[in-house]
Image (cartoon, coloured by chain):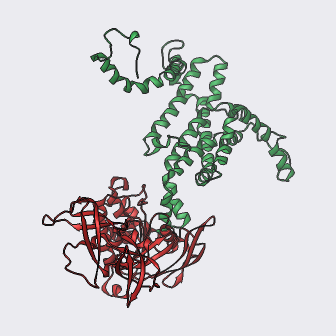
Amino acid sequence: MSVPTTILPSRLVRGSREWGAWKRALPKLTPLLLAAPLLAYMVVFYAVPVVLMLLRSLNDPNWSLDHYVGLPGDTVFLRTFWITLSTSFVVTLSTLVLGYPVALALSRARSSAPLILILILLPLWTSVLVRSYAWMVLLGRHGLINEALLALGLLERPTRLLNTTLATEIAMTHILLPYMILPIANALRQVDPSLARAAAGLGATPWGIFRQVILPQSMPGVAAGVLLVFVLALGSYITPALVGDSREITLSMLIAQQVDQLNWAYAASLSAVLLATALGLIAVAQRLPGVGNAFRMNLR
Amino acid sequence: MSEPRGILDSPEEKSRGRGASVSLSDLEKSYAGVAAVAGVSLDIRSGEFLTLLGPSGSGKTTTLMMIAGFQAPTSGDITIDGASVVATPPYRRNIGMVFQNYALFPHLTVAENIGFPLKQRGVSKQERTRLVGEALELVHLPGYGGRYPDQLSGGQQQRVALARAIVFKPRLLLMDEPLGALDKQLRENLQLEMRRLHAELSITFILVTHDQDEALTMSDRIAVMNDGSVAQVGRPEDLYDRPCNRFVAGFIGESNFLPAAVRGVESDVVVAECDGVLMRAVSSVRPASGTKVTLATRPERLRFADRPVESGLGVNRMSVTVSEAVFAGERCRYLLKTEGGTSMVLKEASSAAVRRRAVGERVEIAWSVADTIVV
């Protein structure tokens, strides 16, 4: 890396001691310099607003911990927090159960792998809003699912599917599925295929190979997928707001509601709880062996 | 298992012979119409150490994979102890297998890796611990049971892989380039270990390698493979001294090839003319007079013959020019040119007492008829 000498202090001429020091320091600084634009952007547009929001929960109207002290006894908050956690849990579990076989298929596929990958990623390229509206159409009182169940004679009159917690869980499972599939497929792809062979040669049945060799080695991917989906589910707003139960609201909906009513400090304290929950989960997961590695996406 | 039994056999078990006999008949495997293995027939005896030796692409690994059951033959049959196993899935063949990349399970400890085949067979935990300990002793790694594979060196990993492949007392052990990833010293060490294990276990070993030294030092018999079929099967010394064709003569050890024309046959010796010199060579076939043949000799079996001490029927002689002389420590290597322009190599054990030949010098060389083969 050469620096035009004209814009540098006069002492910094080629060959001088200062020049040498600069030349040695530059390679170490390169990663930082490359990341600097994004870093600056994140500080200005993310870190600063987050800090301001956190401050607001502490100093509005005057410095106190009142907004937090009240939370453990706040039944609305507790109910909402519980719904948020349980919904996230159900969504995580269902994406895991539905996603693992797909991840396995993706990792095993050869020529059809790009097609499977596109089918998984396609929904990701569609707006969450559009996909949530699509679920409203499907789950509505006269939606496709109700009509189909009626036609099959399984229902006598349309049942309420839309605006239930179940609807939130179904729609969010669909929306978050790729985040479960991709880390697991990535982990499975890194399992040496000769290990399955070796296991078969040593007497393991196909099921035995899966259970004793493949599954344990995919656990870092599973942990990464679970973490990703759970954290994303915790904070999702659009889907529960559109298809969820308006009485059984999630934390993100409560925050939005409070902001609408200009209860900024209360909304800020709720946001802090949500953020702390997500960060806490990430901190715990990072300590699990191998999970940190699983975040290295490797989509060949 | 009713009574505690070890990996090694009791004397009467040993005398009965525990090794499986394997028979390949007209074995073929083709991928999209291209034959990787084109008709291999081979009988491997009980307790034998047989090596499939050949260059890459010769079909040796494919043959091994078919015996293990990881690949299905396109046609032909594989029998183990007389029973066809073609339809048997690999996990029911009861064959030990060692891979080049070790294929140890990274999420299991050394002891769990070795205990894996026992667990699949429903061996009790207590029995497993005992056999794993015995296996670790056998490969000289006692006390390593609690480690993970990535905490071991390459040589240690391969020992663990070996232990894992023999702990369940298979009657047949397959090894696919097991020492390929190790450095020379370690390789030679493990070669001796594997010979010892073969002697102690008295089971059938089938080894795949492209390394002729490995094949020569370890095997009871070698099957040299080329282009998907077996070029020659025999004991190492048979293959070295009596290669049946030019490929085998060139692949195992180094050979000098002299073009010659047959002039006659005297009992089991062929008389052929090369650059105007009559030579004698042993041959399994009796070619007609005038046939063009190639005579093969080994570089270390040629010697300089300054004085015409020995001549007669037992020795071939030729006069050549030294075109290159290389001192390589334990031996000197000379590149020679015959009068007809054919290049030959002569290797002479080095000694301070022996005069080294200069480039350009004209010399007489001689070698035994017994070391001359028609290929």
Percent x, y for residue A14?
32, 16
Q: Colour of chain A?
A: green
Q: Residue at x 51, y 85 (%)?
A: B82
Percent x, y for residue B47?
38, 81
User: Would you place residue B261 above or below residue B333 in this image?
Assistant: below
User: Would you place residue B360 above or below residue A250 in this image?
Assistant: below
Q: In front here: A58 or B365?
A: B365
Percent x, y for residue B255?
36, 70
Residue furthest to the bottom: B267
- Quadrant placement of the N terminus of chain B: bottom left
Q: Colour of chain B?
A: red
Q: In front here: B370 or A226?
A: B370
User: Would you place residue A49 above or below residue B150 in this image?
Assistant: above
Asked if residue A65 lies left or right of residue A242, the reply is left
The image quarter in which residue B89 lies? bottom right
Q: In front here: B253 or B369?
A: B369
